[in-house]
Amino acid sequence: MVGSTWPKGDSSGISAYAERYVHTPKTQELMANTETVVVLDVTGPLMNAFYTTENAITLFEVGTYKIDYFLTTESKTETVLTIGVNRNNTLIPGSDISGDRIADYFTQLTGTIIVELVHDDVLTLVIKADRATSLSFNSSTNAKLSIIKLS
């Protein structure tokens, strides 16, 4: 039996990618039920994207992108955290992920989405807590936002 034949994708390779992350010990204060941009102060390699906006990735090429993101932090209080990816200050549908946090324990939230993006879209990793808290980042990579253009 012969397997299915699928349409071939673009053979020219990856034409756009970028990543931002945090890799230093620090804290970030959150107010209750207030969306906050995660501080991603380290930039990684990039192609056809820009780091002109603080803590953000700005796109150069129109296309379908895979966006990977995560947050690993310790909360000073028990809380429910929600992370997501904003495009031009608006949450991308399906990117929001929530989880309970136990005080003084490091826990992780991780997500991946595939979405159509256009030139000059600005992407940020955002977080919201159901109550005011302080988040601690240790000296490993605690938060990351990365993109790869698929087509």
Image (cartoon, rainbow, N blue to C red):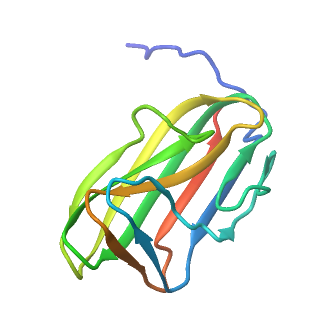
Numbered marks: total: 0
Q: Nearer the viewer, residue 30 or 121?
A: 30
Q: Residue at x 26, y 57 (%)?
A: 130
With 71 as the anchor, is 103 left or right in this view? left
With 99 as the anchor, is 31 left or right in this view? right
With 95 as the anchor, is 74 left or right in this view? left
Quadrant in the picture for the C terminus: top right
* Relative to 61, residue 2 above or below: above
Quadrant in the picture for the N terminus: top left
* Relative to 136, residue 8 above or below: above
Q: Nearer the viewer, residue 27 or 50?
A: 27
Q: Nearer the viewer, residue 69 or 11?
A: 69
Q: Residue at x 22, y 75 (%)?
A: 77
Horizontal and vertical percent position of residue 47: 80, 50
Horizontal and vertical percent position of residue 107: 28, 70
Q: Nearer the viewer, residue 79 or 57?
A: 79
Q: Residue at x 40, y 54 (%)?
A: 34
Q: Quadrant location of residue 29? A: bottom left
Horizontal and vertical percent position of residue 70: 44, 59
* Relative to 17, residue 42 above or below: below
Q: Residue at x 50, y 75 (%)?
A: 141
Horizontal and vertical percent position of residue 31: 37, 64
Q: Quadrant location of residue 76? A: bottom left
With 56 as the anchor, is 69 left or right in this view? left
